């Protein structure tokens, strides 16, 4: 089966022009974000290789998986009970094979591949958004992603850029009725991060826009691929669970190990209110971002963009049920955020300039914070 | 359709595996049931008969349940609330009754002159004690008790659960002993399991 290239009604010249524009946005944004990250690195007076400065926190876990595989029991971590099972396998597998392939780059091949994923994400987002929107709006949406406050995480060895790309590919292919591809990418996404499996819900909503519940249940002609893709979507997660059972003896080890970080599933509202209760705590900032994210979700619902709203809403509520830490990174890793902001600022040039200025300044600041190991930006 | 069916069968099979985890006792208790305070490491719950479990000097006692115990202190560890448990695996061969020796300081003063507690092993009560202020004889109010555990109640290499139940815990602030608001029962100093015949 030949992989269908995304196609839109544009001439070859126009496609080339916009593609070059997308590449330019990518190059400039990476120049700014990684440049500021490098400045931050210089500020640390560190003698460590640059890669190590960009490889903070969770990146260390991925390196451990790449170098030693998954642990059978926790070892050598300051949280004595923490283990690598919490980290899904597709991202470290990708890094592992990239290192094998681009051995001459050493660990820097990680930076190469995650930035490659980001570039692909921008190209797919453009194609996806162009289905129903103007070139101008699609490009602004791209700018928001490229200069997102947390966009440095798209360029360091975290799962963010891979997850962004896969989520976009699922939405794109589902929207253009290429359901088998949508299912395949969803399966990959479910092997990338824990919230990846939730993509099945937006897929279902996209399917229900095109087909009735009855026709899906009866497997009417044309719906077989839809049903198959929905069933295929969680395969990555289940394969990982199967692996964990044989490796650790616990199918849900990826979830159960959260206890090591004192994360217990609870009421997201309680977690949010607790964060909002103390304005002098960093959790207050996390909670404000969360409220903004929920506001954007509501806006997407109002605009009847239900699949995007579901992805964003579930992507917020799932981590929020345990904690507020890292929530800004999770939220800015979900593309519906940018769609919502693009739509909210449409036809308001001044507001767009303002949003872009705030975003790009924040992205530079957070890049510096990351390379200085400021844990609040994790 | 065949592939879809196979996938669904695979998902059901994987989920069914969660009913029978093949992990160590320690993994089950810490990660799956989440009843332990600390990760004891694999085989970390193994207990050698006769060796005292020392709760003093801020030690991390790996046998402790997640709830029911306060933070470690130099002098021992307070039980909090009505139930504090320990989980351990006796590896020695058991050929007779066992005794459980407990050294503790109950939360007592004039406003709270008695504390009722009981001790269960694997769900079976093996004794109860009423600590009274008037009976306090040892220095710093330390009490020592021995409980007999009938032969067969603890099995070699099987998980043993010891429950300390406190009927009337109280906060020191409520009885004007200090400003401490924790609901405390007794401060456990040491606990030892040993065969009855062992001196």
Image: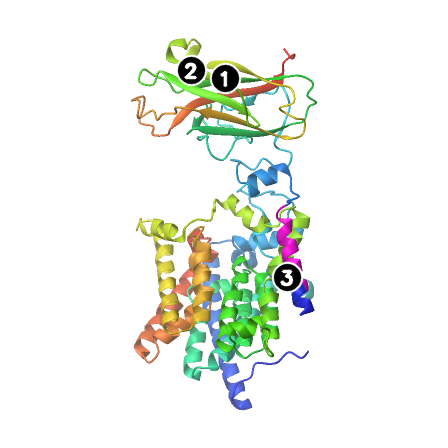
The residue that appears at 59% across and 79% down in the rendered structure is: A222
The answer for how far apart the CA atoms under marks 2 and 1 are is 12 Å
Residue tagged by mark 2? B131
Residue tagged by mark 1? B103
Is residue B15 magenta-colored? yes
| Residue A355 in which image quadrant | bottom left
* Image coordinates for residue A118, horizontal then vertical, percent: 53, 70
| Mark 2 and mark 1 on one chain | yes
The answer for how far apart the CA atoms under marks 1 and 3 are is 56 Å
Question: Dot 3 lies on which element?
Answer: helix
Residue tagged by mark 3? B8
The residue that appears at 51% across and 86% down in the rendered structure is: A17
Task: Tell me which segment is drawn in magenta.
Answer: B6-19
Q: Quadrant of the N terminus of chain A?
A: bottom right
Question: Dot 2 lies on which element?
Answer: strand
Whether residue A27 is visible here, answered yes or no, is no
Which is nearer the eye, A284 or B109? B109
Left or right: residue A124 versus residue A377 is: right
Q: Residues within 10 Å of mark 2 (few under 14, many from 20)?
A: some
């Amino acid at each position: 089966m030949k992989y269908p290239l995304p196609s839109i009604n544009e001439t070859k010249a126009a496609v080339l022009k916009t593609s070059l524009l997308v590449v330019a946005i990518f190059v400039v944004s990476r120049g700014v974000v990684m440049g500021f990250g490098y400045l931050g690195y210089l500020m640390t007076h560190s003698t460590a290789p640059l890669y190590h400065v960009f490889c903070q926190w969770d990146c260390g876990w991925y390196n451990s998986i790449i170098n030693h595989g998954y642990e059978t029991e926790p070892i050598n971590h300051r949280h004595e009970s923490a283990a690598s099972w919490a980290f899904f396998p597709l991202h470290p597998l990708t890094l592992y094979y990239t290192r094998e392939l681009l051995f001459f780059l050493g660990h820097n091949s990680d930076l190469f591949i995650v930035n490659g994923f980001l570039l692909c994400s921008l190209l797919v987002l453009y194609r996806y958004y162009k289905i129903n929107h103007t070139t101008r709006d699609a490009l602004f949406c791209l700018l928001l992603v490229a200069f997102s406050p947390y966009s440095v995480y798209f360029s360091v060895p975290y799962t963010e850029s891979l997850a962004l790309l896969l989520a976009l590919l699922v939405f794109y292919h589902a929207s253009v009725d290429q359901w088998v591809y949508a299912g395949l990418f969803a399966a990959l996404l479910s092997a990338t991060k824990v919230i990846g499996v939730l993509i099945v819900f937006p897929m279902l909503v996209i399917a229900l826009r095109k087909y009735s519940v009855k026709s899906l249940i009866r497997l009417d002609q044309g719906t077989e691929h839809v049903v198959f893709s929905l069933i295929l979507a969680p395969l990555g997660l289940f394969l990982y669970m199967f692996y964990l059972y044989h490796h650790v003896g616990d199918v849900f080890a990826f979830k159960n190990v959260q206890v090591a970080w004192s994360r217990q599933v609870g009421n997201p509202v309680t977690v949010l209110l607790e964060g909002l209760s103390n304005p002098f705590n960093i959790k207050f900032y996390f909670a404000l971002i969360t409220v903004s994210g929920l506001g954007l979700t509501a806006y997407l619902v109002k605009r009847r963009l239900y699949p995007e709203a579901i992805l964003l809403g579930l992507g917020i509520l799932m981590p929020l049920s345990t904690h507020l830490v890292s929530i800004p990174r999770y939220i800015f890793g979900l593309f519906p955020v940018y769609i919502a902001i693009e739509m909210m600022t449409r036809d308001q040039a001044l507001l767009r300039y303002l949003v872009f200025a705030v975003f790009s300044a924040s992205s530079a600041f957070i890049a510096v914070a990351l390379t200085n190991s400021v844990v609040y930006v994790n | 359709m065949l592939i879809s069916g196979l996938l669904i069968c695979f998902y059901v099979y994987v989920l069914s595996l969660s009913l029978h985890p093949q992990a160590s006792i320690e993994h089950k208790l810490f990660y799956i049931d989440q009843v332990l305070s600390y990760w004891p490491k694999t085989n970390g719950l193994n207990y050698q008969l006769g060796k005292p479990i020392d709760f003093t000097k801020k030690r991390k006692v790996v046998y402790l349940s997640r709830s029911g115990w306060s933070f470690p202190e130099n002098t021992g560890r307070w039980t909090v609330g009505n139930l504090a448990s320990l989980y351990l695996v006796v590896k020695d061969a058991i050929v007779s009754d066992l005794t459980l020796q407990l050294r503790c300081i109950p939360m007592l003063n004039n406003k709270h002159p008695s504390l009722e507690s009981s001790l269960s092993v694997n769900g079976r009560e093996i004794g109860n004690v009423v600590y009274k202020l008037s009976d306090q004889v040892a220095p710093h109010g330390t009490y020592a008790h021995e409980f007999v555990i009938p032969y067969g109640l603890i099995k070699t290499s099987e998980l043993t659960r010891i429950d300390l139940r406190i009927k009337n815990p109280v906060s020191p602030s409520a009885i004007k002993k200090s400003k401490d608001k924790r609901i405390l029962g007794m401060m456990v100093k040491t606990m030892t399991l040993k065969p009855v015949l062992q001196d």
